[in-house]
Image: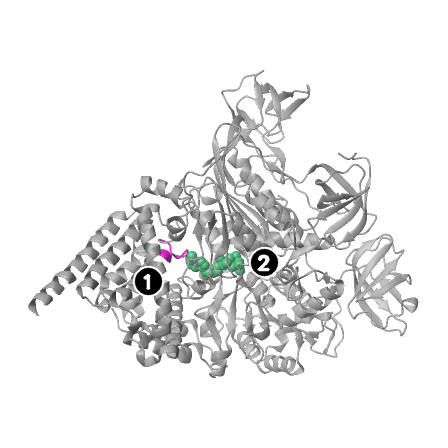
Amino acid sequence: MGAKEYRTLRNASGGLVTVEDAPNIAFGDRVLIKDQAGTTRNGQVIRSSAHEVLIQVFEGTENLDIEHTWVRFLDEPVEIALSPEILGRVFNGLGRPRDYRPPIVSSLHRGINAPPLNPAARTYPREFIQTGISTIDGLNSLVRGQKLPIFSASGLPHNRLAAQIVRQAKLPDEEGHFAIVFAAMGVSYADARFFKEEFASSGVLSNVVMFINRADDPPVERLTLPRMALTAAEYLAYELDHHVLVVMTDMTHYAEALREVATAKGDVPARKGYPGYLYSDLAEIYERSGRIKDRHGSITLVPVLSMPSDDITHPIPDLTGYITEGQIVLSRELHNQGIYPPVHISPSLSRLMKDGIGKDFTREDHPHLANQLYALYARALETRNLASIIGADELSSRDQRYLEFADAFEARFVQQAENEERSILETLNLAWDLLSMFPQSSLTRVTETEMAKYHRQGS
Amino acid sequence: MNNPNQPGVVLQINGPIVTLRLPGVRNGEQVRIGHLGLYGEIIALQGDEALAQIYESTEMIRPGEPVAGLGRPLSVELGPGLMGGIFDGVQRPLEKMFLEAGDQIPRGLSPEPLDRERLWNFQPSDLLEPNMPIIGGAKLGSVQETQSLLHLILVPPNIQGELIEIAPEGQYSLNETIARVRLANGHVEKLKLYHHWPVRRPRPYQGRDHGVEPLITGQRILDTFFPLLKGGKCAVPGPFGAGKTVVQHQVARWANADIVIYVGCGERGNELVDVLDSFPQLKDPYSGRPLMERTLLIANTSNMPVVAREASIYVGITIAEYYRDQGYDVVMLADSTSRWAEALREVSGRLGQMPVEEGYPAYLASRLAAFYERAGRVDTMDCGKGSVSLIGAVSPPGGDFSEPVTSHTKEIIETFWALSKELADARHYPAIDWVDSFSADVSTAAKWWHEAVNRNWERRRGEALAILARDSELSRIVNLVGPEALSSAQRWVLEGASLIKEAVLQQSALDPVDTFSSPQKQFLLLDLVLTIYDLGSELIELGVPVQELAGQTVMARLRRCKELYDSSQTEQLLAFQQEAIDSFKVIRAEYAQRLEAS
Ligand SMILES: Nc1ncnc2c1ncn2[C@@H]1O[C@H](COP(=O)(O)OP(=O)(O)OP(=O)(O)O)[C@@H](O)[C@H]1O
Ligand SMILES: [Mg+2]
């Protein structure tokens, strides 16, 4: 139908404008608004009837002189141009190059809001990915097609951890690396540069597509950015057969941008001012990861988010946890003790681990071993807590051993170097070293056969 | 009903809420919107305009597009061919759509939920004769829907009249007439193997009955500690990752129900794939047939349009009632009712209704109650008994049980399986908190247990809970002043509680043996642990140190029993019990000797 222009603006306030006598305007259509100064703003139709169209202006309605402003309905969905050339490129939240190179020329354009994936089209993700990081591989294993976020907080090394995952992730017995889609929303200049240099120095740059929106870029572009990135990821995975690892940072900036826009629209807030549909909105993003029947490629999603005031019950981590298939939680306490990566295993979880580890994937003892470590560490943390109240000297010798275990676990298992890549077998053996601090009679989550084989005191 | 020749038109689009003009349309009527024919339902009439909620994305729909009314409220198709299928929130067949339309769900697709081609072997009821009066819910005959399920073909509930003719035994497709009935007004109604029923209207029954026996799920903490009756209402609240879905999957796998309806309402796609992949390989422990033969999935995952979540649980419960009417015990699982409530909130917000708490509309509580009220055990129209047990997951924001959905649900249900983050973090699974959970039906369940399993069930259950209660009291003391302040007897209580937790309460869904525990095994394990505890208490009184008892090798074995012996190995369990008793007797003897010697 082609673009249509109107000058019949009637109202402009609170980020919204109404246009009269614009019949047949599609709901959700994109809009360009050119104000008296000739500057264009972007908007979207959020209500449409024959006599009045309500438009949300992303950049706000300040200083908008409605007498001298016109709007143009683009009559097209937001799209991204796709070709194999996107690998190695950098784009902004609207899909425009930000690497001073020409735009992608391609006849293939895709709308960034994909219709929902049919659950009957999915296959269950099962292939273990080795990240070389013990707390992940051993206790919260990632599988191909999973969505596993990193819950972090300001000042914690989530970027370094994400970069290490990107560098080291591979299937234990398969050649070839992941194609990387990197989506950055509201990040600082330093963080953006950190990642670029990381990719460059590890030589993967030509295998990475970057979408970058910096802290000083328009917040509204943060809303389209992850959808651009996922559309690119889907193209790489399902049309070019790549296994794609998507890293998104920082989902908190995304959610804040969404709140800003929702507030301007006057949507009824649910918790902490976030709109009631934040859950569904995040789910639209996260659920685009996975594996599909008869498709070779896959999309594994590692979103990074910072928990405001370190609060895991804040709506952003909370709703994310309700959608994703687990979470890796970083701890300020471990970080302050100088432990890298400061993964706090108790609240961490990988829900897809159960089907991706064990006999045919890692090693037969892995499931029980992980379980046992979790149980011991939970008990050890309780003991440490007790010790802090009544003093370690007051503890029984049995409890003393738990204290020693907690320290050893953190120092040897959790802690590792940023360039240290432990194979899954190394991780499992290390775990048995630690378990062997306890007599066999106090280990009831591993089987007697497993202990006979791996417990350092033998049977 | 509107005249199909009268064209309707879209007036305004406001997200999933569309204002339209469609002369004669009724409230609740199903509509198709726009050139794409999007699914929708009228939710309010305002003068000559109507408001519809749309179950698909309305993006790029324009004012002026056409609207058609379907002349009936949002309904489901009920007939053979439902079992083993996966449908979306408005009962569209997802497998079929995948084959026809590919990976993503295009808008406006409206394939028939039930296969029209497939032939079913219809066996008419031999009690029927021409000219006899017939009422809704009466049995016309049956078809074998799956190997384990005989599907009764009932007269649709709203039909009443005189039977003119019934088809002889033979192969029929859903399109064929199998009976003709003359209604009171003289109109002749042709009945088929299937009929439609509006999802928001509960299906009628003759009367309500109370629950008489527990639903056995094979999960110890549920069956032994917080039983749910067949026909009961239950909620499973818990923060993310605490284990709501695992509990529901376990119930779907192991419950002694005839039919399981699993509604994935605003949750993950992969969780449904998990069921689709694993159930055909798993055997129903009661019938020995693949589990998928008794299971039906409704999937409105979190990335699918929000408003359809609202419909999905009604679609699920209506199908559940349909099988109940055939005299079956049905379990319906809804994961998660919070997402359903959020869909209500979304629509009410768009309608500009006054929010009362956390954005939810004032009618949240009454809608929840009305929904749960559709569970129950009933006398069917066909003079049988059938039940729908309803188990809803609740996902409270921040894990806070005082939020509106959890607190309103809690007032309605009879059984409450509360999941705790602390237990889940410590990998105590199922992370069901024995303090916060409850069941109002323990005494009814006890009757069954006492008859079917063991007369001491209620007493033993009470003893175990008492030990757990003392354990939390004593633990509080320990956390203030350290373990040294406790007497030996008190420390033995801590040890006993830890035994109960590890040997009885914890049950891994992933362990091939322990994933299911028969009622017999449940009782034996409980009895075993308490027997050892009681013996130990006596020894402690004699002065045996707690450390010595706790260090016994039988104690470690005791913790493994659940995974060592499956439900059929009751002999071995009893033998182990004897061994454990003996080893404690040895200590007693030794200790008595020592006492004498000194
Ligand atoms: N009985 C159990 N046995 C073994 N593992 C369990 C059990 N219950 C829960 N788990 C573990 O906990 C994880 C999370 O459980 P589940 O997915 O059921 O949580 P949930 O409460 O449904 O979370 P959400 O609200 O986010 O959907 C599972 O993936 C599994 O690893
Ligand atoms: Mg769940």
Q: Secondary structure at mark 2?
A: loop
Work out which residue is located at the far top of the displayed protein and give it: B131
Amino acid type at mark 2: Arg
Q: Read off the magenta span.
A: B505-513
Nearest to the observer: residue B388 or residue B8: B388
- Give the vertical position of B448 relative to A278 (above or below): above
- Looking at the image, residue B117 sits to the left or right of residue A85; the answer is left
Q: Residues within 10 Å of mark 2 (few under 14, many from 20)?
A: some
Please give the chain letter of the residue carrying mark 1: B
Q: Which residue is mark 1?
A: B498
Instruction: Report crowding for label 1: few under 14, some 14 to 19, many 20 or more residues within 10 A (C-alpha).
Output: some
The answer to whether any part of residue B114 appears in the image is yes
Q: Is residue B212 left or right of residue B311?
A: left
Q: Position of residue B68 (x, y in %)?
A: 77, 40
| Residue at the (49%, 53%) spot, across then down | B236
Relative to B118, B251 lies left or right = left
Give residue B518's position: percent from left, percent from top: 35, 47
Q: Position of residue A34 (x, y in %)?
A: 87, 69
**Residue B122: x %, y % from top left:** 53, 27
Mark number, residue A295 = 2
The quadrant of the rendering that contains the C terminus of chain B is bottom left
Circle 1: residue type: Ser
Quarter the N terminus of chain B occupies? top right
Q: Residue furthest left?
A: B597
Which of these two is toward me, A231 or A416?
A416
Alpha carbon distance from label 2 to label 1: 48 Å
Q: Main secondary structure of the magenta part?
A: loop
In the rendered structure, the answer to whether residue A265 lies left or right of residue A166 reads right
Q: Is residue B29 above or below residue B18?
A: above
Where residue A197 sits, quadrant-wise, is bottom right
User: Camera-side residue: B106 or B348?
Assistant: B348
